[in-house]
Image (cartoon, rainbow, N blue to C red):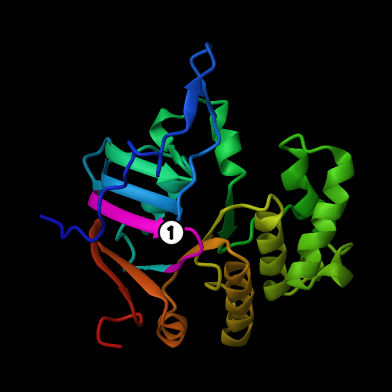
């Protein structure tokens, strides 16, 4: 039996109301959420994920992350971190249990509501995933273009996030002309351009040297100080131990740790 480390979210009082309504087409759309202080950014209640081949990736996970939290997600390879991230962005749904992000229970969302949800989540990947033929500006703008953002709003939004990550002078360069750190900052700008409530960073420093890794961490900390919830999956023990933030640990699909501290329990 897994240790329960977080209470079940209150989904009946409006604290985490699914905030959806039927559109009459089989889909649902997001509705304004009831006020809550502090607000819950992410919650999982009794979540398990079993794949068709029988492999259990997550088992009985209970977790609550408040808006404005900075959380490190740690654990060995195969512990379930990637599965958890896929559930949070609704690439997959749990076999059992409930996943809430930004006030919506994700398995209840129809196809039209999913893009709206994802505009509230920014994702930063280890391998950057930039479009090689587009400039820095175009890569960031593309994230708005594909969601139908009016053109008059795209330019100012892109300028704002490029200034935030310190890439205004590199706006017309292509990824091949950038350092690894600059590519990752471009990826962070792309993740931030929608002004999301939550940033999910999946090993964002995994391909970077230690000095550049610290620069990326400082940027994520600055974003967190602006009020954005940051969830960062990492194997970087030095960074986790130095920052002394909240650490959520997974092992064999089970949540085994949820505390402020270093990478290891005794650090």
Instruction: Say which residue label 1 marks.
Output: 66
Residue range of the region highlighted in magenta in the rendering: 59-71
Residue pictured at 49% horizontal, 23% vertical = 21
Report whether residue 1 is seen.
yes
Q: Is the magenta stretch mostly helix, strand or loop?
A: strand
Task: Specify the quadrant of the image occupied by residue 64.
Answer: bottom left
Residue shown at the point (54%, 33%) measured from the top left: 114
Residue 101, percent from left and from top: 45, 45
Q: Does the magenta stretch include residue 91?
A: no
The percent position of residue 193, horizontal first and vertical second, equals: 72, 54
Tell me what residue is drawn at x 33 percent, y 48 percent. Answer: 44
* Vertical position of residue 193 compared to residue 223: above or below: above
In the rendered image, residue 257, in percent from the top left (x then y), is placed at 25, 69
Q: Which of 108 and 234 is in front in this view?
A: 108
Residue 254 percent coordinates (x, y): 22, 58
Dot 1 crowding, Cα within 10 Å, few <14, some 14–19, many 20+: some
As drawn, 59 above or below 201? above
Q: Extreme top residue here?
A: 24
Instruction: State whether residue 236 is above or below residue 162.
Output: below
Q: Quadrant of the C terminus?
A: bottom left
Tell me the quarter of the image containing the N terminus: bottom left
176 horizontally vs 104: left or right: right
């Amino acid at each position: 039996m897994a240790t329960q480390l977080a209470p079940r979210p209150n989904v009946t009082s409006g604290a985490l109301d699914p905030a959806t309504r039927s559109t009459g087409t089989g889909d649902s759309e997001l509705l304004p959420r009831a006020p809550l202080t502090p607000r819950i950014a992410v919650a999982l209640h009794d979540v398990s994920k079993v794949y068709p081949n029988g492999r259990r990736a997550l088992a009985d996970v209970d977790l609550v992350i408040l808006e404005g939290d900075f959380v490190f997600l740690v654990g060995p390879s195969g512990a379930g971190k990637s599965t958890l991230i896929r559930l949070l962005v609704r690439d997959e749904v749990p076999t059992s249990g409930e996943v809430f992000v930004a006030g919506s229970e994700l398995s209840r969302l129809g196809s039209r509501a999913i893009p709206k949800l994802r505009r509230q989540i920014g994702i930063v990947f280890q391998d950057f995933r930039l479009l090689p033929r587009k400039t820095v500006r175009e890569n960031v703008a593309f994230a708005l273009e594909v969601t139908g953002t009016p053109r008059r709003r795209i330019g100012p939004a892109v300028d704002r996030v490029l200034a935030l990550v310190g890439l205004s002078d590199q706006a017309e360069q292509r990824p091949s002309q950038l350092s690894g750190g600059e590519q990752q900052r471009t990826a962070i700008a792309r993740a931030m351009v929608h002004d999301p409530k939550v940033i999910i960073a999946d090993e964002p420093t995994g391909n970077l040297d230690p000095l550049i890794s610290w620069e990326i961490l400082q940027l994520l900390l600055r974003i967190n100080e602006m009020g954005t919830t940051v969830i960062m999956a990492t194997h970087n023990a030095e960074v986790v131990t130095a920052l002394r933030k909240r650490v959520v640990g997974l092992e064999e699909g089970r949540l085994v740790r949820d505390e402020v501290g270093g990478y290891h329990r005794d650090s």
